[in-house]
Image: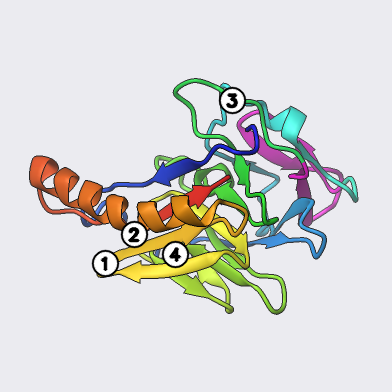
Amino acid sequence: MHRGFAAVLLSISLLATAAVRSACIPAEVRMDATHTAIDFYLHLPPGTTRIALEDLAPYSRRDLWQSPDESATVEETAIAARGAHRDLHLRMGVSRQPPHQDRAYAPFQRFADGTVAVYGPQFEAPAENPLQLCVRYVPVQGEQVIGFGHASSSPLSSAQPWPPGYVAFGKPYVQRHHGLLLVSDRGAPAWIRQRMAVSIPRLVDLYRQRLGPGTVPTVFLFA
């Protein structure tokens, strides 16, 4: 995205769209200290050698992900253990903004201030898959992880009944407006941040009037 422009990620979901996962494979998503890569870790249970994942099309998981320790093979809709490996390590470089694709959620969005928002469903299994993942998003020390309507210096978990969306790592501006969490890029012009702080809550109210009761947990504004 060209500098000087701003974009908004607006996630709107109906209430009670996700269920608590009673049993799942624990996994972790971490931002590296330089904010240039996202690391994805998981431990396979006995008898499991392959985990199905949500399709990233039109983006290619094979082009985006790699296994630094060669513990896993990356497929478009799955990851598979190599040899006797049970602890899998995947990595996605996030130093450059991904190419824009129409009608698709980018695997990540990079803010001008270094914050990176990752698309959560890429780390999840399809809903019909018997093996599900419970993902913890772990922030860099001294920073925050923001998503699901929460901003915290402690890990956030996808095992809670929260709708899918983006989860950000970094130190952006975070403001609350009633039930809305507005996350703003520190690199965005102040006048845009101020205008969005007024306009977005009005937009949310309009959607609620048209679509009925719902929640908009997090809105990301980035340059």
The tag earlier along the polypeptide, 3 or 2, is 3
Residue 101 in the magenta stretch? The answer is: no
Identify the residue at the far right of this view: 69
Mark 1, secondary structure of its residue: loop
The tag earlier along the polypeptide, 3 or 4, is 3
Dot 4 surroundings within 10 Å: few (below 14), some, or many (20 or more)? some
Measure how far apart labels 3 and 2 are at the Cα level: 24 Å
CB contact under 8 Å: marks 1 and 2: yes
Would residue 132 be visible to someone looking at this image?
Answer: no
For this view, does 37 lie left or right of residue 52?
right
Q: Amino acid at mark 4?
A: Ala
For this view, does 177 lie left or right of residue 47?
left
Residue beneath label 1, please?
Answer: 179
For this view, does 62 lie left or right of residue 207?
right
Magenta segment range? 71-95
Residue beneath label 3, please?
Answer: 100
The percent position of residue 162, horizontal first and vertical second, equals 36, 60
Viewer-nearest of discs 4 and 1: 1
Q: Amino acid at mark 2?
A: Pro
Would residue 7 be visible to someone looking at this image?
Answer: yes
Q: Which mark is residue 159?
A: 4
CB contact under 8 Å: marks 4 and 1: no
Measure how far apart labels 4 and 1 are at the Cα level: 21 Å
Task: Residue at 56% x, 35% y: name it.
Answer: 106
The percent position of residue 83, horizontal first and vertical second, equals 87, 45
Q: Amino acid at mark 1?
A: Gly
